Amino acid sequence: MFYVTESHTFEDIIKKSRFIGIIFPCLNDQDVFRQLKALQAEHPHANHIAFAYRIKTNDGVIYRFHDAGEPTGTAGKPIFQHIEGKNIINALVVVIRYFGGVKLGAGGLTRAYGHMAKQAIDTAALHPYIEMATLHFTLDYERFQSFDYALKKVNGHIIEQVFAGQIHLTVTLPVEKQSDLESQFATV
């Protein structure tokens, strides 16, 4: 799986219609709807603002696509197919169309929206998605230095630390490295 960290835009004229393809990082539905609302305010005279998104949640991957008034299956679905095809998560891809007076037909629309989604995705830097786990540890002070070294070795990070009679830590690390650390240091 891959994700993007910043938005990227690609613009093209296809048979006199102006198309703007944009990819945005989005972590949840609220991010998606905020971004769509901002785009509608930014492009009030656009004829269509079609979109698709795919977001990873604790319950799995959720997705949605919308044709925005274009014939069914000619805008949102082609956009979504490029997101899914590249295995991108936590992203919203929007294609804005300003109608130029030439009808493209169903096939032409499908190709145009798919092309714009592909170009927006291709301009973005895709990063490999690494699923992270959050764990809690309680350690004696003399074990902290070796724990910190082992955590850094598996690309983990300390999120919270409380120093009392013992050290209470909340850490995040890649899921595939979880058992490595747990085998060395018992979790609480």
Image: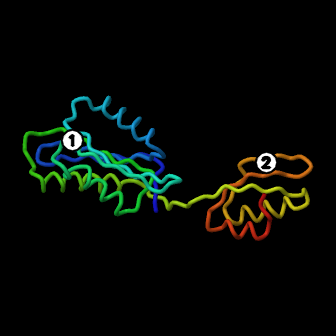
Circle 1 is placed at which residue position? 97
Instruction: State the residue at coordinates (15%, 49%).
Output: 14
Residue type at tag 1: Arg
Circle 2: residue type:
Gln
Percent from the top left, x then y, of residue 119? 30, 55
Residue 53: % across, % down:
37, 49
Neighbor class of circle 2 (other Cα within 10 Å; few <14, some 14-19, many 20+) is: some
Residue 110 image-quadrant placement? bottom left
Query: In which quadrant of the rendered view does residue 134 lie?
Result: bottom right
Between residue 164 and residue 187, name the one nearer to us: 187
Instruction: Report whether 60 appears left or right of 63.
Output: right
Q: Nearer the viewer, mark 2 or mark 1?
A: 2
Tell me the quarter of the picture where residue 172 sits.
bottom right
Residue furthest to the left in view is 102
Mark 1, secondary structure of its residue:
strand
Residue at point 10%, 49% (across, down) = 104
Report the side of 86 relative to 114 (left or right): right
Of mark 2 and mark 1, the one earlier in the sequence is 1
Task: Mark 1: give few (<14), some (14-19) or many (20+) Cα within 10 Å.
Answer: many
**Quarter of the image that includes the C terminus:** bottom right
- Residue at image coords 15%, 43%: 17
Query: Percent position (x, y) of residue 162?
Result: 82, 46
Q: Which mark is residue 161?
A: 2
Relative horizontal placement of residue 67, taking residue 155 as reference (left or right) = left
